[in-house]
Amino acid sequence: MKKLGLKKVAVMAAAAFTVLGVAISASADTQSDLDAVKAKIAETEKKVSEGQVALSKLESQEAKTSQEIATLKKNIAARSEQLADQARAAQLNDAGSMLEFVANSDSVTEAVSRTVTVATVVRANNQTLADQKADKEKLAQKQTDLQAAAEKQKKQNKELAQARADLAVQKTDLEAKKASEDEAKAKAEAAKKAAEEAAKQVAAAKSTDDAEKAANQAEAAAASVSSSSNNGNNNSNNQAASQTTSQASSQASSTSAAPAASSVNSSSVLAMADSLTKMHIPYVWGGTSLSGFDCSGLTQYVYGHFGKSLARTAAAQAAQTTRIPVSQAQPGDLLFWGEGGGVYHVAIYVGGGSYIHAPTKGQFVKYGSISGWAPSFAGRL
């Protein structure tokens, strides 16, 4: 019986070591992925900075070109006046035209001289007209090139801003996964120690009953290793669902509990919202993109990235939520200002009395404080 117990312990211990190795490997792989995302974030932030510098240079060039344009316009106006003067000069001595001017010569020599003069005037006129045309084309080309370069840079900056926001979400998800795997690893190591201790007790047992009892303890310890590993994997793949279940269980024990937490991963929502506060995105009435947001456009954009479709206005979004007191709001809930159909503003609650919102014209997406501007109620999706 004792030999059977020892064999059983050996099998269970081997299973514990195998599962522990998987837990360690999974944690290392996730750390590698996390490091890669962090490197991409650093690279993207560098490109964002370079893009902003490039756009600033284009804006500076635009100001300089505006001055050049003003000068060119003056030159064109001066040449137009010069052409008018030359046209008047062509009618010397009240001669009706250049032909009459030549024909009225008193001698052949004077006629030749006047012909040269006329030719010179015509040539000068043609050159002036050519210069004027060239300057107009230069002006138009400068405007076209500058506008095209500025639009291209703005598009690149917008794409970089989107990439930065997406990477922030990936980073948050990987950090959550890593934390879950680290927890599973710690549990696995503890279970392994328990299995090793049970194995020692089997070896030292003085009776078959003691040996069998210790073998059962070793089996339970090894089984807990597998349970820890599986739980860790489930947590990393279904973090939002497990959070909802845990919160719902806790709330069920209280008669005054608030509605169940949102199924959306709040940590990812908050990570994306936080990244948007760093991009200097202006408030734009009706805005729903990185080029500009209004309050409900911001919440719709953020939650839409996580599969949650929100209505277009603050009042309609309020109708989609379960109303709760502001004091019961949790990170990821929505905050509303106004009542009923008169709801006029919405924000994302981040915890600690703070929220992220698109405030009003002339401001950027940023943090706000409940103590500074208190919402009327909170809503849970």
Image: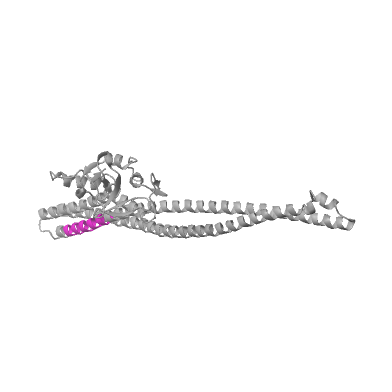
Name which quarter of the figure residue 116 lies in. bottom right
- Does the stretch in magenta take in 258? no
Q: Which residues are magenta?
A: 181-199
Residue sticking out furthest to the front: 94
Name which quarter of the figure residue 315 lies in. top left
Residue 220's spot in the image, x, y percent? 17, 51
Residue 29's spot in the image, x, y percent? 34, 56
Q: In the drawing, does residue 168 fall left or right of residue 77?
A: left
**Majority secondary structure of magenta residues:** helix
- Does the stretch in magenta take in 187? yes
Total labels drawn: 0
Residue at 47%, 57% in the rendered image: 51
Front-most of 152 and 314? 314
Query: Can residue 198 be seen from the camera position used here?
Result: yes
Query: Can residue 22 be seen from the camera position used here?
Result: no
Q: In the drawing, does residue 86 fall left or right of residue 177?
A: right
Q: In the drawing, does residue 212 fall left or right of residue 179?
A: left
Residue 277's spot in the image, x, y percent? 35, 55
Q: How are the colours assigned in the image?
A: one colour
Front-most of 316 and 29? 316
Name which quarter of the figure residue 78 lies in. bottom right
Residue sticking out furthest to the right: 108
Q: Quadrant of the C terminus?
A: top left
Front-most of 298 and 68? 68
Residue 114's spot in the image, x, y percent? 83, 56
